[in-house]
Image (spheres, rainbow, N blue to C red):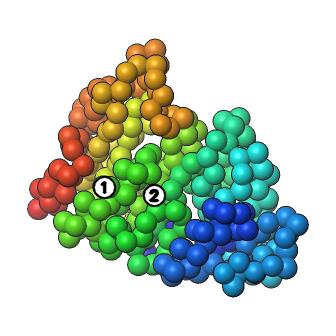
Amino acid sequence: MPILVNEDTRLLVQGITGREGSFHTKLMLDYGTKILAGVTPGKGGQKVHGIPVYDSVDEAIEKHPEINTSIVFVPAKFAYDAVLEAVNCGIELIVVITEHIPVHDSLKFIRYAKYRRSLIVGPNTPGVISPGLSKVGIMPGKVFKRGKIGLVSRSGTLTYEVANEISKSGLGISTSVGIGGDPVNGLDFIETAKFFLEDENTDALVIVGEIGGDAEERFASFIEKTGFEKPVVAYITGRTAPPGKRMGHAGAIISMGTGDAKSKIEALNNAGIQVAETVSSIPKILFNLLK
């Protein structure tokens, strides 16, 4: 069974009455995602695209106890409380789409979620999709074709481009996980790779990294130490980024001479991971590794 989201996903949309929440609820419903309820404080009793709205997560869970996943579109200043509410109600997987959440808020709710054994994807993520089964996110579903390649990425737009290249090649995607572009994330490359390692529907893994932080270097060290048993291909964006300049994502900044593309590529190569120079070359490398 694909990782994180699948045909058993039963979704709650927090912030469903907002512009983004309502828009993407319609797209997820059109994709076939099983959305059972939405939450917006003060707007309980309404319906959005036929989905009932409740004032709190507690009320939604009481009416729909089969809910196991939440997606958060709540504005940044309210996101902390929204995530804690979902965690306290025992929701297993919480996908936080919201961007510009203060880092100290993210740190606190991620730490609390781990303590309560909930999984956080994001914040500032495009979400998670298992093609043909369930989409919990804002990605364009049509570029994701079903297959056996696991995809995990820090970049939303590049996720779509890489997925499109893999899908066009005929290999397809088992599950795509956007871990988010902020400096602090819930699931990281390593934790997500462990899920893919146990997934019989995934034959190989593609990771899409970018400048800033050390997530790719830590992933390389993990692969080197554990001898990951499935083929891995990496792509790193931001090769020409100037030091000290933020490049789109809050986490994509080179500082003090660390976190640049060169250091990440070297670390991945040293761990035996092939790093693609272009997005379009990823499928060819995958075909060679899967021979």
Residue at the farthest top position: 256
Q: Position of residue 133 (x, y in %)?
A: 45, 78
Query: Residue 79: percent from the left, percent from the top?
Result: 73, 51
- Residue 120 vs 137, above or below: the answer is above
| Residue 197 is at least partly visible in this image | no
Q: CA distance from mark 2 to mark 1?
A: 12 Å
User: Is the residue 216 above or below the residue 77 in the image?
Assistant: above
Q: Which residue is mark 1?
A: 162
First in sequence: mark 2 or mark 1?
Answer: 1
Report the disc number at residue 8: none
Q: Is residue 163 left or right of residue 248?
A: left
Q: Measured along the vertical axis of the image, is residue 137 above or below residue 98?
A: below
| Amino acid identity at mark 1 | Val
Which quadrant of the view contains residue 18? bottom right
The residue at 69%/85% (across/down) is: 50
Secondary element at tag 1: helix
* Residue 121 x/y as whole percent: 57, 54
What amino acid type should be assigned to the residue bearing mark 2?
Val
Give me the residue at 29% from left, 43% from top.
235
Which of the two discs, 2 and 1, sits closer to the camera? 1
Q: In this picture, is 270 found above or below 196?
A: above
- Asked if residue 94 lies left or right of residue 177, the reply is right
Residue in the picture at 85% in, 79% down: 45
Say left or right for 69 vs 207.
Answer: right
In the image, farthest residue toward the right: 42
* Badge number at residue 177: 2
Report helix, strand or loop for mark 2. Answer: strand
Q: Quadrant of residue 111?
A: top right
197 or 287: nearer the viewer: 287
Circle 2 residues within 10 Å: few <14, some 14–19, many ≥20 = many
The quarter in which the N terminus is drawn is bottom left
